[in-house]
Structures are given as C-alpha cells and as structure tokens.
Image: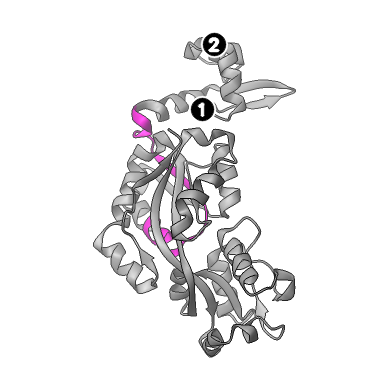
C-alpha cells in the first residue's frame, strides 16, 4: 500500500489496522467500516478509514459533525438550530427527520449518527423501545438515551375543537384525516387510536400522507385536512387545537461512542437550559425530566 492510495482492499485494510482479514469482512458486512462492494469485492476509501479512526478516538469526542435522523420533533428542531448557530463554521449538526423505522435503518447502515424514536406510551417504553432496536443486527453497539416525555393526541383547527367531545363524529367520512407514513411513530399511535374505536385507517376519509409532523400540522392549518394525530408541540407551533390521547417517550438511539461527542453533549445541555424550558412550555406537552439519561444499552 502506498501513501497516496485512494482505495484499499480488505487485505490492505487488515494490514493498515492490524486486524485479521476475516474481521475486516465481518466489520464491513455489519457496516462498522466505511466501504462499498464493487463487482463483488469490498473497496474502502482510505480517507474515510482515516476519518473512522479519528471518530473512534476518545469515544468520538473529536468529531466535528453530528447527523440526526428518525422521528420529527419541533422542540428538537428549535434546539438544533441554536446549537448549530453557536458551532458556526467549526462543525456541523444537522437534523433530517424521516420516521422511526426508516431512521433506525439509516442508523444501522451508518448514514446517520443519531436516530430519534417514539413508538410507545411512556409507561411501556422500557419494553417496546429496546424490542424495536433488537430488529437490527448492530443493536448491541447502541445505547438508548431519553429525550423527553411528550403528549400526543388529536390535532385540528380551532373551529373543530368541539368535535373532540364527539369522536364518533370526528371519524365520520365527512371529515378529512391526514395520516403519517407507515413506520412513523405518529402513524403507529393513530392505528392504536383507531383500534380503540373499533376502526381501521380504511374507515376514514384519508388524504395524502404527510411525511413529517410539520407537514401534517401544516396540511391541517391550510385547511387541506381536518384531523391528524401528532404531538402537542407541533399543534402549539401551528396554532392548532389539541385533544390529548396519551404521553409518549421521545428517545434518541446512537452508537455508544457517539454519546460522548461534543456536539451531542452540547445538544443535551441546550435541551436542559432555562431558555429551552421556556420554549417547551410555550409549545406545550413536554416533560424534560431525565433528558440525556441513558435508559438502555445491550451490555
């Protein structure tokens, strides 16, 4: 191997890292090493191998970027923007939500550093969230960190608030519902709510899916739909009426080393600040007790 090699094969990576070649293949197949298969053979960009070594030093605390995916949350958007402003040009923190299940797949494949999830009411979190993580082969490398408890429920415009007392009328075909995509925590909560009413999504007058909490709330606020299920914080951000249905745990999943990264610790510090607490109270429905606490690890 020469110093100017752009790509390394598995044997060269094994020599470079002083590993057994079989270990390199195993790490590549588990997405622990940055590489790609070309005509059936693994190739590893040397620059990314070097970056992987740096990111591994000191638990990743020297890394200058943090990519967050998974579930959508308005308070987290608020905090990420402020941490990003403080970081300035010295690093990058980015929040690109999709949904809980897609976010875990992205994390498993190494495309993101952190995945936000919400898949159960708070009292079931310690069982349901770890069970969700265990669908992924790399879950033993992950830790689950608490973000917040947040209220979820029915979102509607203020003129429909009276229908919160008449759910049978609210689910009638005269009213338009905007669902989230399958794999999102809000869609999971909507399906659970409908089951409690003896209904399924096919019984509703469904509009096109919203791909985020923000898109769902905006659809209702524009008058393109009448009802949807999401968190109280997004209702507060868009000035919508809200009928609480329960409290869910909004948590963050990450590889163990990522927990110690400077940008992530700055994020948790900001989430627990008085300014963030004021904003959380303005949005409504948040409890930030135990924010930043590790609540599960495979070990």
Q: Which residues are magenta?
A: 58-80
Q: CA distance from mark 1 to mark 2?
A: 19 Å
What SS does tag 1 mark?
helix
Which of the labelled discs sits on residue 229, or is there none?
none
Residue 268, image x, y percentages: 33, 50
Q: Does any portion of residue 132 appear in the rendered image?
A: yes
Q: On the rendered structure, is 287 left or right of 125?
A: left
User: Looking at this view, is 203 or 254 the one in front?
Assistant: 203
Pointer 1 local density, CA inside 10 Å: few below 14, some 14–19, many at least 20: some
User: Looking at this view, is 197 or 87 the one in front?
Assistant: 197
Residue 276, image x, y percentages: 31, 63
Image quarter hosting the C terminus: top left
When the figure is inspected, residue 239 is found, relative to residue 52, above or below; the finding is: below
What SS does tag 2 mark?
loop
Residue 35, image x, y percentages: 60, 26
The residue to which callout 2 is attached is: 20
The quarter holding residue 195 reads: bottom right
When the figure is inspected, residue 100 is found, relative to residue 74, above or below; the finding is: above
User: Which residue is located at x 70 percent, y 69 percent?
Assistant: 201
The residue to which callout 1 is attached is: 48
Image quarter hosting the N terminus: top right
The quarter holding residue 232 reads: bottom left
């Amino acid at each position: 191997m020469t110093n100017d090699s752009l790509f390394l094969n598995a044997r060269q990576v094994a020599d470079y890292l002083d590993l057994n070649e079989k270990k390199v293949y195993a790490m590549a197949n588990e997405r622990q090493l940055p590489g790609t298969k070309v005509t059936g053979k693994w190739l590893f960009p040397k620059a990314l191998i070097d970056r992987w070594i740096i990111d591994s030093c000191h638990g990743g605390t020297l890394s200058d970027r943090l990519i967050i995916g998974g579930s959508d949350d308005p308070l987290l958007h608020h905090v990420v923007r402020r941490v990003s402003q403080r970081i300035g040009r010295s690093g990058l923190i980015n929040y690109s939500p999709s949904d809980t299940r897609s976010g875990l797949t992205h994390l498993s494949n190494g495309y993101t550093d952190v995945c936000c999830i919400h898949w159960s009411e708070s009292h079931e979190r310690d069982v349901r969230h770890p069970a969700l993580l265990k669908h992924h082969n790399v879950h033993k490398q992950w830790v689950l960190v608490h973000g917040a408890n947040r209220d979820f429920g029915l979102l509607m415009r203020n003129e429909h608030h009276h229908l919160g007392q008449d759910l049978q009328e609210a689910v009638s075909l005269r009213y338009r519902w905007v669902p989230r995509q399958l794999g999102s925590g809000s869609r999971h909560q909507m399906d659970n709510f409908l089951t409690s009413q003896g209904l399924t999504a096919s019984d509703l007058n469904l509009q096109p899916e919203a791909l985020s909490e923000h898109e769902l709330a905006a659809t209702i606020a524009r008058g393109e739909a009448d009802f949807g299920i999401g968190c109280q914080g997004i209702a507060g951000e868009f000035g919508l009426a809200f009928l609480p249905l329960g409290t869910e745990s909004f948590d963050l999943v990450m590889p163990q080393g990522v927990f110690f990264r400077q940008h992530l610790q700055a994020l948790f510090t900001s989430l627990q600040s008085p300014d963030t607490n004021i904003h959380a109270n303005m949005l409504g429905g948040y409890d930030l007790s135990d924010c930043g606490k590790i609540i599960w690890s495979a070990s």
